[in-house]
Amino acid sequence: MITIRKAKEGDIEIIRSIAANTWPSAYLEIIGQTQIDYMLEKMYNRAELLKQLMDGHTFLIAEDGEADAGFAGYSIINHDERIYKLHKLYVLPTAHGKGIGKILINEVFNQVKNLGASALQLNINKHNKAKDFYLKGGFNIKESVVLDIGDGFVMDDYVMEYKF
């Protein structure tokens, strides 16, 4: 049985572990190991995740029975227009095919909708297979962006949006 719980500070290591175990299968062929290592250190170090928690990001952890199997993270990015952003959604490769990603995104939809969201946005690498998951889920490609993330690395992404 899949259950979802809101993450607390004590769950930061779980989030870091799931990211470290998910990113190679999701991104190795797209961006290579050097950029994976750089981005994991930049975006998933303990201090950065703690800062996100303190700054109002909500993290949800999916449990498959007793095992942590995935997580999602979101926050509001535009108060005036009530736009939220899905910053992260990852499911362990060993848990793929169980509907965990769908359960996580549906829970994010429910939560932001209850908060009065007009839209939910996300950035996704243009070559990430998960793009199809989001398109099937009702997201549309809003724009194409190339973001400089330092050390000579860029994120070549689509901004996708789901309107409520």
Image: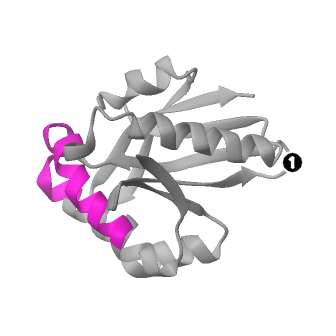
Q: Position of residue 32 (x, y in %)?
A: 14, 47
State the residue at coordinates (62%, 77%).
Answer: 54
Q: Where is residue 49? Give x, y as percent.
A: 47, 72
Image vertical order of residue 135 relative to residue 32, above or below:
above
**Residue at image coords 40%, 40%:** 100
- By secondary structure, the bulk of the magenta-drawn segment is best described as helix
Name the element at disc 1: loop
**The quarter of the displayed image where residue 152 is located:** bottom left
Report the amino acid beneath label 1.
Asp
Evaluate whether residue 19 shows in this view.
Answer: yes
Is residue 147 in the magenta section? no
Q: Would residue 27 be seen by someone viewing this image from the given angle?
A: no
Residue 73 relative to residue 98: left or right: right
Compared to residue 38, the image places residue 49 above or below, namely below
- x and y, in percent, of residue 69 in the image: 33, 53
Say which of 105 and 49 sits in front.
105
On the image, numbered disc 1 is attached to which residue? 80
